[in-house]
Image (cartoon, rainbow, N blue to C red):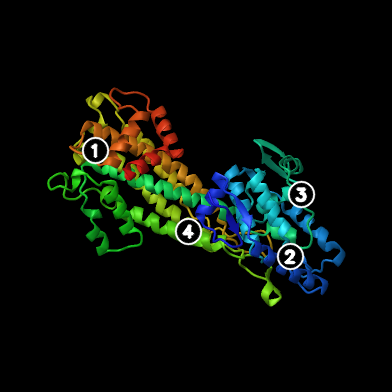
Amino acid sequence: MMTIAIGEDRIGVAEVVAVARRGAAVMLAPAAAGRLDQARAVLEDWSRQDRAVYGLTRGLGNRAAQTIPLEERAGFSETALKGRATGAGGYFETEVARAALFVRAATLARGGAGVRPVIVETQLAMLAAGVTPLIPRIGSVGTSDLLLCANLGLPIIGLGRAEHGGEVLAGAEAMARAGVATVTLTEKEGLALCSANAVSVGYGALVAHDVHDLLALADAVLAMSYEAFAGNPSPFDARVAAARPAAGQEQAAAALRRMLAGSSLFEPGVPRRVQDPISFRCATQVHGTVRAALGWAEQDLEVELNATADNPLILAEDGEIVSTGNFHTALLAVAFDALRLALAQLGSQSSERCARLMDPELSGLPSRLTRHGVTRAGVGLVGMVARTLSRESRHCSAPCSNDDVTPMGVEDQAPFTLQSVRRTADQLGFLRQALACEMIVAAQALDLRPPARLPPVVAALHGFIRRHVAFVDDDRSTTEDVEALAAAVDDGAALACVHSALEV
């Protein structure tokens, strides 16, 4: 794995995942260190001249018009960081904190905040040594993750708490055990550490990556349900998709054709119906919508990952420092809101396909997919679980970005971006379980009416399911079946099976 050079390399979702989950190495590009020194010189010059600069020579928030005495400016950095380090709701997972630490280091390396190179170098040393600050889950409103990023910055000065070597330690102890020196802050560095959207952006990158994985598995599960239903493949014919080239639809149709490559469904007379229910017939329209919404979110994540969104912003080449509003992440909040709406439709279709497969009039299969008639439940209750999970997903799709009430006089509107990202992560948990339910139902249907020929992806996925969940012949509790398969979806094993079949 290559070393990522922040301040030089363009950062994307893949780089965040590589650092947060796989421990990829990161370095500060030499040219970036020079830019940091240049920006720092501008900041120190303005401080000496006592020019009005938010958070440097003037106060924060409602105190922006009040002067900070020269002798208090260096100490104010630490005070500002400590005073804003609060939050609630427990703590984020290690990978989210690592993502946030990497994102803040990468954006600071662009030189707009005026920190010394030692600040970024310390953040990178923490990543390399496995020092992970504890960050509360709740406390951001989306006009920077101010309170949470303050917690992220505390161990740098030997405060707060951090995880190291599997233990949660005082910040100073974690840094000492890792052999990473703490830093004494100087002018504006405290504000630079906490005035950022690193938690929302880092977490958002991880969630976007997970949506990609979920969508790839959902394509394969859809193909399996098509085989089980003996569905009509005409809706995802390439000519049909091109006739109405809505964003993402052609890619979704191509993905389903790839998953069904080798299927007998493309032969005349094999599909049972001229026209299938909407949950089958319009599935690529919904999967395409998810692709389009995800693309929008990823596009803005890339902007944020490579942006200089600091306030105030140092324009080193012009020798200026200006106030900005670039910390406001409305676009990212709205993009994740839209993504959840698209994902909710994906979950709805998945649960409805379960119901259609168990409907004898539509599927031609036994009611509830049992051989034993009216005295057996078969997998009917798995379908009820799928529908319940779909409703949970829908509840997650309510927008966050339209809740803009904030308590501060001058900070009078906010997009609540982190809530939007976090709710998307919650929704993915429900959708993974919903797909597990559809897999159980579709596998049951395939066993009751085996097609003459299964495409490799569907055959591999069916075999994978049967290694975790047995055919439901006589009634039994299926709680452990759902749990076992959901765990295999959650840990990536099901998707790995699909990828292996595609590579053959």
x and y percent of residue 120 in the render? 68, 56
Let me know if residue 381 appears in the view.
no
Which residue lies under the disc numbered 4? 297
Furthest toward the right, the residue is: 71
Calculate the distance from the C-alpha at mark 1 to the C-alpha at mark 4: 37 Å
Amino acid at circle 3: Thr
Mark 1 vs 2: CB contact within 8 A: no
Which residue lies under the disc numbered 3? 182
Amino acid at circle 4: Ala
Let me know if residue 307 appears in the view.
yes
Q: Earlier in the sequence, mark 1 or mark 2?
A: 2
Q: Is residue 243 left or right of residue 80?
A: left
Which residue lies under the disc numbered 2? 62
Q: Earlier in the sequence, mark 3 or mark 4?
A: 3
Q: Earlier in the sequence, mark 1 or mark 3?
A: 3
Depth check: give the residue in front, 489 or 419: 489
x and y percent of residue 233 in the render? 22, 50
Label 3 SS? loop
Amino acid at circle 2: Asn
Furthest toward the bottom, the residue is: 318
Q: Earlier in the sequence, mark 1 or mark 4?
A: 4
x and y percent of residue 296 in the render? 45, 61
